[in-house]
């Protein structure tokens, strides 16, 4: 014999499990029971006959169960709100913490391996004479930087691969009309510049040749500094900021953009202690116009978090897991459009006692 479920019993069973841990059925199950007769349980003692509810009351009770079930389904089907992006300050302070807690290592050279790209413009006269026309082209380089810790040892930029390509068909036509001269001049957003048309790689260029101040190395912003000065930088963010402001030189009042460029040059190129690198991140975190652009890929396709200054031209990409700097980019904005004019992506960096193996030297 079957019996119809009691409406009050159905309402009790529809109670959320979070409120009544004894609830045995979901709201969907209760709706099914409300629509169908439930078979009697074998061997169950028959209860005294009860008066059947009027049809109107039965309909009202079932409707109440349905409304309660719908409310329950909606309450358990809410999607979590999208997470609020972290501020640039939070990202940079977290990166500082990760960098600072890494195991300190030292060696004879600060060695970095990376790739760079820069947009260049140059021109030559046609082979038969005539007025030179400018050619815009893109140069991509693979390179290694060997930065000596001791001043008595030379530092080197080794270019292992290089390719140049005119930007547009018109640039290529002009370039071919000039004899298709070699497109050179490795540069980037954070790589020491090597001026002039370069030979075919591989080659090594000495960076600390004081006879040529334009390429003497190291330098931070407008200031030519020594390795000892870089290694002796303070790790306190306020003290670091004062030193970098002093290194800005006679070019004018230091701005957030100049501090951002100096800090990223130190982080990407030069040998600093872990505490100083953490201090540089903390100094950047204190700049009022720094902002987090969210998850982004660097020029090599690696994912990280992008940090830049509002209205600035330089952007960095930080690895979330290690706090390591992945890449530095330079952008030229024209209204709503921004063109990447140079970038440097680091694939390895750290101290080593190895001796650089140098190809032919410039």
Image: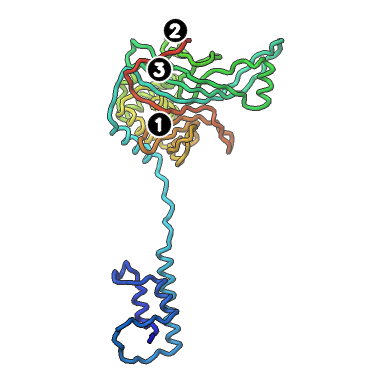
Q: Quadrant of residue 261?
A: top left
Q: Residue at x 47, y 39 (%)?
A: 296
Q: Which residue is mark 3?
A: 218
Q: Which mark is residue 211?
A: 2
Describe the element under mark 1 as helix, strand or loop. Answer: strand
The front one of 212 and 326 is 326
Real-space Cα separation, disc 3 to disc 1, in angstroms = 19 Å
| Foreground label between 1 and 2 | 1
Please indicate, yes or no, whether residue 289 appears anywhere in the rendered image.
Answer: no
Q: Earlier in the sequence, mark 2 or mark 3?
A: 2
Which residue is rendered at x = 32% and y = 82% of the image?
42
Q: Secondary structure at mark 2?
A: loop
Q: Is residue 69 above or below residue 207?
A: below
Left or right of 13 on screen, residue 138: right
Q: Residue at x 40, y 44 (%)?
A: 86
Query: Mark 1 to mark 2: distance in Å?
Result: 32 Å
Mark 3 vs mark 1: give the one in front: 1
């Amino acid at each position: 014999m079957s019996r119809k479920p009691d409406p009050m019993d159905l309402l009790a069973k529809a109670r959320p499990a979070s409120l009544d841990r004894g609830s045995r059925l979901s709201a969907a199950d209760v709706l099914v029971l409300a629509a169908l007769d439930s078979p009697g349980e074998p061997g169950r003692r028959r209860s005294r006959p009860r008066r059947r509810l009027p049809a109107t009351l039965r309909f009202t009770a079932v409707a109440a169960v349905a409304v309660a079930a719908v409310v329950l389904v909606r309450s358990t089907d809410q999607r979590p709100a999208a997470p609020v992006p972290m501020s640039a300050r939070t990202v940079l302070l977290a990166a500082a913490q990760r960098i600072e807690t890494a195991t300190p290592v030292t060696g004879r050279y600060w060695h970095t391996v990376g790739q760079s790209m820069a947009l260049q413009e140059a021109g030559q006269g046609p082979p038969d004479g005539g007025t030179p026309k400018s050619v815009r082209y893109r140069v991509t380089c693979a390179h290694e930087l060997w930065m000596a810790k001791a001043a008595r040892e030379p530092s080197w930029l080794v270019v292992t691969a290089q390719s140049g390509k005119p930007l547009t068909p018109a640039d290529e036509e002009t370039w071919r009309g000039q004899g298709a001269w070699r497109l050179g001049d490795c540069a980037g957003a954070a790589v020491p510049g090597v001026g002039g048309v370069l030979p075919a790689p591989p080659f090594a260029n000495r960076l600390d040749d004081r006879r040529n101040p334009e390429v003497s190395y190291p330098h931070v912003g407008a200031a030519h500094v020594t390795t000892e000065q870089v290694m002796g930088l303070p790790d306190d963010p306020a003290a670091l900021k004062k030193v970098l402001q002093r290194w800005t030189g006679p070019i004018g009042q230091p701005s957030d953009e100049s501090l951002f460029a100096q800090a990223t040059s130190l982080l990407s190129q030069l040998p600093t202690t872990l505490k100083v690198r953490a201090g540089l991140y903390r100094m950047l975190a204190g700049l009022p116009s720094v902002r987090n652009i969210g998850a982004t890929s660097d020029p090599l396709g690696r994912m990280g978090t992008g940090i830049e200054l509002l209205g600035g031209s330089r952007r960095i990409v930080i690895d979330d897991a290690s706090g390591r700097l992945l890449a530095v980019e330079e952008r030229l904005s024209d209204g709503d459009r921004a063109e990447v004019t140079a970038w440097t992506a680091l694939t390895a960096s750290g101290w080593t006692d190895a001796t650089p193996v140098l190809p032919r030297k410039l």
